[in-house]
Image (spheres, rainbow, N blue to C red):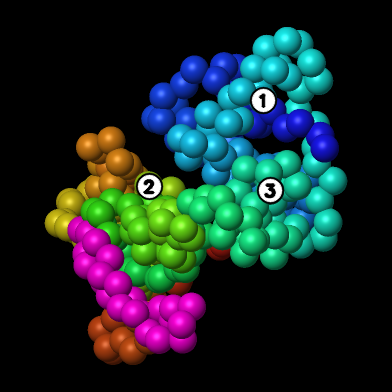
Amino acid sequence: MIFKDYYSILGLETSKITKQELKTAYREAAKKYHPDINVGNTQAEERFKDINEAYRVLSEPSSKRKYDRMWNSHVGKKKKAYEESNRSNGSKFSDFFHMFFGISEDGEVGKETAKKKKVPVRGEDIETEISLSIEETFYGCEKKISLRTSKGTMKTFSIKVPAGIRNGEKVRLLGQGKPGINDGKNGDLFIKINIENSKKFRLSGVDLYTDLKLTPWEAALGTRATVESINDTASIYVPQGIASGEIVRIPGKGYKDGKGGRGDLIAEVKILVPKEISEEERSIYETLSKVSKFNPRISE
């Protein structure tokens, strides 16, 4: 059986680490090799499985002590370190992992092993996702979701979404995943937050985009306009001769950046022509068409 250097897998050089150091290393490694980021990359997928496997072993004190004895024997004496395991298709954990938890190929604890050794095994995590509006995530909110349990019943969860959560981030509910085995801890429930654009705002990173609608004469002459941000209004100067598609950037009026600041509000110009005009307006437009030399169809 191939020895697997779990510390090397997580980017750690020593077994003398704190729980927080282990968690930090796990999060960084999992983020780098997550399947959502490495779509279609089978090597990254296998690596991601090894990362989860390593964390499962090292996060349990009893299995970590057992593993550390092997690690000191292999790595401490300069023997062969980590190698990729040969997984069968669909195999969640390697054979090397089985010797710590007695896990079968379908990811469940072997009944005989569990019965004899009473090894505590942490339950699997559950992931789901919900969609929220920009306003809900900007201010923070509380939502209720219902999920079907492994027993077939529906269970309702209350989720507190923190103000300023970023698109794609996850809310974690401790112990609300699948139940553990042999008094092992329950897994966690992760809820991915998808932020939906509204009629007024479009989110890009920490910047908010909105439309700045102008009349033809406002665009030609320049004007001062009031623009609504997500929580107040801002007065901006629009320079003369501005065209549709150009932008006016308003600093510090965008989405929360997670550091106590905010991104920018970006007003995209849209010049609108009235569908109905009075006789006086028609006369002015006709006069303008005669005296103006401007022709947008002629290249400059």
Name the residue that disc number 1 marks. Answer: 70
Labelled pair 2, 1 in contact (Cβ < 8 Å) = no
Image vertical order of residue 150 relative to residue 71, above or below: below
User: The magenta stretch spans which residues?
Assistant: 139-160
Confirm whether the magenta stretch covers residue 258. no
Give the residue type that dot 2 points to: Val
User: Which of the two discs, 2 and 1, labels the residue nearer the N terminus?
Assistant: 1
Image vertical order of residue 68 relative to residue 95, above or below: above
**Front-most of 286 and 133?**
133
Q: Residue furthest left?
A: 232
Image vertical order of residue 148 relative to residue 172, above or below: below
Q: Residue at x 49, y 36 (%)?
A: 62
Q: Position of residue 32 (x, y in %)?
A: 61, 39
Q: Main secondary structure of the magenta part?
A: strand
Image vertical order of residue 50 relative to residue 188, above or below: above
Q: Residue at x 40, y 86 (%)?
A: 153
Spatial distance from mark 3 to mark 1, Cα to Cα? Answer: 15 Å
Q: Position of residue 14 (x, y in %)?
A: 57, 16
Which disc number belongs to residue 206?
2
Q: Residue at x 41, y 70 (%)?
A: 130
Give the residue type that dot 1 points to: Met
Q: Residue at x 62, y 43 (%)?
A: 100
